[in-house]
Image: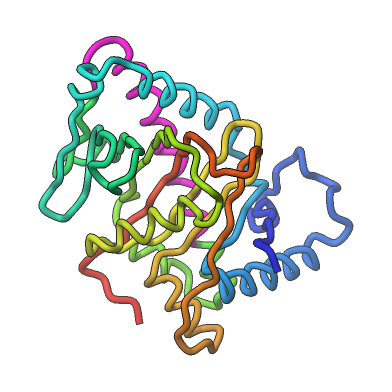
Amino acid sequence: MGLPTIDISLFYEFEDPSREGLYEDPLAERTKAINALLASLAAYGAFKIAGHGNPGTTVQRVFDASVEFFGLHKHIKNSAAGSRHKDGRLRGYWGRGTIDRDSSETFIAGPATDRQAPTPWPMGVRGDILQMTMQPFSRECANLHHDLLHILEEALGLWDNELVSHWPSADGEVHCTHHPTPRPASTCQLEALVSQIEGRDARVMLALGFEDGTSEEILVVCGATVRKWAQARLGILGGEPRPISQTGRDGHQPKYSVSYVGYENSAAFIT
């Protein structure tokens, strides 16, 4: 079984007008979507979504801005040199090999309201463009992350806000990464990112992976705690999720990737 694509417009109280009449029996389709979601959670700890209402043009602007940023002179990129904060959060620009010991370079932006771990932005007009592009995108991702937690609550039979209450103040960050050397599609980049972050003792709620502005599909990977909760609700004892394959158009992983990572409240405890 591959990762199913869940039309999450079925879960919104007011369905997207553009999708009106798409299903003869929306309630039956919603039940089918929940079953597919649960099966994918059990097997992979991940799923894909469509029908989220986020315009592809917004995603494409972030890709375009990040491609332009990574093409800038090194001294401009280094004006936003990365910083590591007390809780393990990374912010700003990280050059090749400084995070994952490979050839990739990454820019990480936290929410505009984060005063504990502020984001250093590159100097000049290009830095202003990057900031004006990424901050609204981050807010849109936070709203979608919130909606997905509510959908998971319904699918898993949890109380309303039982998951949402463990995600403090839309706590998340956008990762833009440039992979200069094509890599085989043996490992999903987003899955590897979640594993890397959790290796720093940070607790991920959900991570959203965007291909580019041409695809409506978004990959959603659950963090370890959410996976364990889902496994408990589904009666699954332990076990690691199956690896996710992510193949680009040429058989390799994409050269550029954009993702959003939502963090769990480190003081919260999920049973």
Measuring from the top left, give residue 106's x and y in whole percent. Answer: 33, 36
Measuring from the top left, give residue 2's x and y in whole percent. Answer: 68, 63
Q: In this view, does 145 lie above or below 235?
A: above
The stretch in magenta equals: 122-149
115 sits left or right of 218 in the view: left
Q: In this view, does 109 lie above or below 225?
A: above
113 sits left or right of 18 in the view: left
Measuring from the top left, give residue 74's x and y in whole percent. Answer: 24, 19
Name the residue rendered at 36%, 61% in the picture.
195
Name the residue rendered at 13%, 47% in the picture.
85
Considering every residue shown, the one lying at the far left of the view is 86
Q: Can residue 154 be seen in this view?
A: no
Name the residue rendered at 25%, 11% in the picture.
124
Q: Can residue 66 be seen in this view?
A: yes
Name the residue rendered at 45%, 58% in the picture.
191
140 sits left or right of 215 in the view: left
Q: In the rendered image, which quarter is residue 46 located in?
A: bottom right
Measuring from the top left, give residue 226's x and y in whole percent. Answer: 42, 70
Dominant secondary structure of the residues highlighted in magenta in the image? helix
